[in-house]
Amino acid sequence: MALINNTTGLITETNTPGKKYLIPFILITCLFFLWGMAHNLDSILIPHLKKACQLNNRQSTLIDTAVYLAYFLMAIPAGMMLKKWGYKNSIIVGLLLFAFGAILFVPAADMRAYTMFLGALFIIGCGLTILETAANPYATILGDPAGATTRLNLAASFNGLAASVAPVIGALFILSGKEYTSDQLSAMTDAARSAYLQSEASAVKLPYIILAVVLMLVAILFYFVSFPEIKGQSKETSTGGSFFGVLRHKHLLMGVIAQFFYVGAQVCVTSFFIRMANQGGGLDEKTASYYLGLYGFLFMLGRFVGTALMRFVSSPKLLSIYAVVTVALCAVAVLGQGEFVIYALCALGFFMSIMFPTIFALGINGLGEDTKPASSWLVMSIIGGAILPYVMATVIDFNKDQIQPGYIIPLLCFLFILYYGLSGYKIKKQLIA
C-alpha cells in the first residue's frame, strides 16, 4: 500500500516498489525527449539564423553559447532548488521556463532580432538545466542501484529519438531550401531582400509555439501526478551534500571534465553538420537536414544497442570502445573526401550515443547524499557546448571557411573520454581529507 503526503503529493512509502517507480520513470523519460528536441532544433537554427540574420560562423555559434552558458550559470541555483524543493517541483519550474523561452521566439522572429533569439535560447537553457539536474539523477535512483547506468541509458534513448525527429521537423517547417549567395542578395531590391529574410526568420514561429504548448501541458501533468521523493541512502563516504566538497571525489572531478569535452564534441559535430554536408557533399540544406536526421536515428539506435550491450559489457569498457571508434571517425571527417565524410559524421551519432548518460552515471556512482550537488557539477560542465563550438568556428574561419579542419576539435575531446573510460571513472580516495 502507498502512503501519500497530502501536502507535497509525494509517495513516501509503498510495498510495491515496481509500481511506485514505473509511472514516474515513464514521465521522466518524456523529459529526455523534450529537451532532446530543443537541443537538436539548435542544429537547424544555426545554419537557418545564419542565413536569416546574415551572420558569420562565430556569430552563428552564439546560439550554442546562449544555451550552454545558461547551463553553466544556472547549474548551482538548479542544484539548490533541487535540494530545497525536490525533484517534482523543480521539474515543473524547468518546464515552465522552457515554455516561456519557446514563446519568445515569436517576437524575436517578428523583429528579426538575433539578440532576442539569443535571449530566448538562454531562457530555454535555464529551463533545460533545471530539468537535466533533476531528471538525470532521478532516473538513476528509480529502482535497483545496480541498474542505474542501464536505466539512465534507456531513458536517454528517447533523447536520441528526438535527435532523429527534430531535423525532419526542421526540414519540413523551418528550412526553406532557398539559398542565395551574397552577390545574389545584393542584386535584389531592398524590399525583396527584406521580405526574403523576414520569411526565413518567421519560419521558426510555428514549431516553437507548438513546443511551448506541449511543455505547458506536460507541466500540468507533473503537477497532478504523485512522485516518490527519493532520499540518499548510500553508506559511501559523503561530504554532506556540500557543493564544492563533492569535488573531493576524484572520479566525479574527472567525470566533470569528461562531460565538458563530450558535450562540446557533440555540439561541434551537429552544429556544423549541415554546412559540412553542403560544402563537402554538395547537398542542399533540406537534404543535409535529412542526413542529420539519419545521424539522430543512429544516435537513438546506439542508445538502445548500448543499453542492451551493458548487460554483457561493463559501462566503462563500452565507453572506451566507443571512444576509440569516435576518434577514428573524426579522423575520417578531417582527412576524408566526399560522401565518406558525411557517412562518418552520421556514424558518430551511434558511437556518441551512450557517452553522456554513462559519464553521468559513473560520475555520481557511490556519492550518496552528494548526488544532488554532484549532478549540478555534471550539468554545469555542459558549458563545453558553449565554448568548444566557438573554438571550432575559429579554426574554420582561419582555414578560409573550410569546415573539415574544424573537426580536429571533437577528435581531441574524444581522446580524453577514452582516458575516462579506461581509468578516470575509478572510485578512489578523496582528493582532500
Image: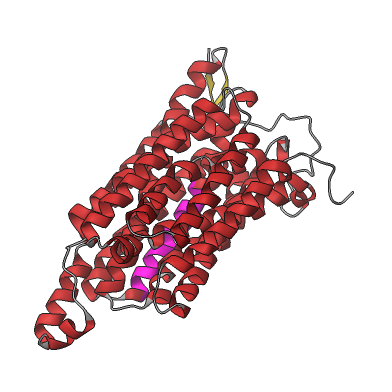
Please give the name of the residue rendered at 36% of the width and 47% of the height, measured from the top-left corner: 295
Q: How many marks?
A: 0
Q: Which residues are magenta?
A: 115-131
The percent coordinates of residue 11 (x first, y second) are 53, 25
Magenta stretch: residue 118 in it?
yes
In front: 35, or 358?
Answer: 358
Magenta stretch: residue 260 in it?
no
Q: Is residue 376 visible?
A: no
Is 409 on the left-hand or right-hand side of 368? left
The percent coordinates of residue 197 (x first, y second) are 19, 75
Q: Is residue 293 visible?
A: yes
Please give the name of the residue rendered at 28% of the width and 63% of the height, measured from the top-left corner: 278
Q: Quadrant of residue 402?
A: bottom left
Q: For the stretch drawn in magenta, what is the main secondary structure?
A: helix
Above or below for 115 versus 348: below
The percent coordinates of residue 162 (x first, y second) are 35, 43
Q: Quadrant of residue 142?
A: top right
Above or below for 370 versus 192: above
Above or below for 286 versus 424: below
Is 169 on the left-hand or right-hand side of 307? left
In front: 212, or 345?
Answer: 345
In front: 312, or 50?
Answer: 312
The percent coordinates of residue 55 (x first, y second) are 33, 78
User: What colour scheme governs how the chains and residues are painted in the rendered image of this protein?
Assistant: secondary structure
Q: Quadrant of residue 61?
A: bottom left
Please give the name of the residue rendered at 19% of the width and 55% of the height, measured from the top-left corner: 173
In front: 238, or 300?
Answer: 300
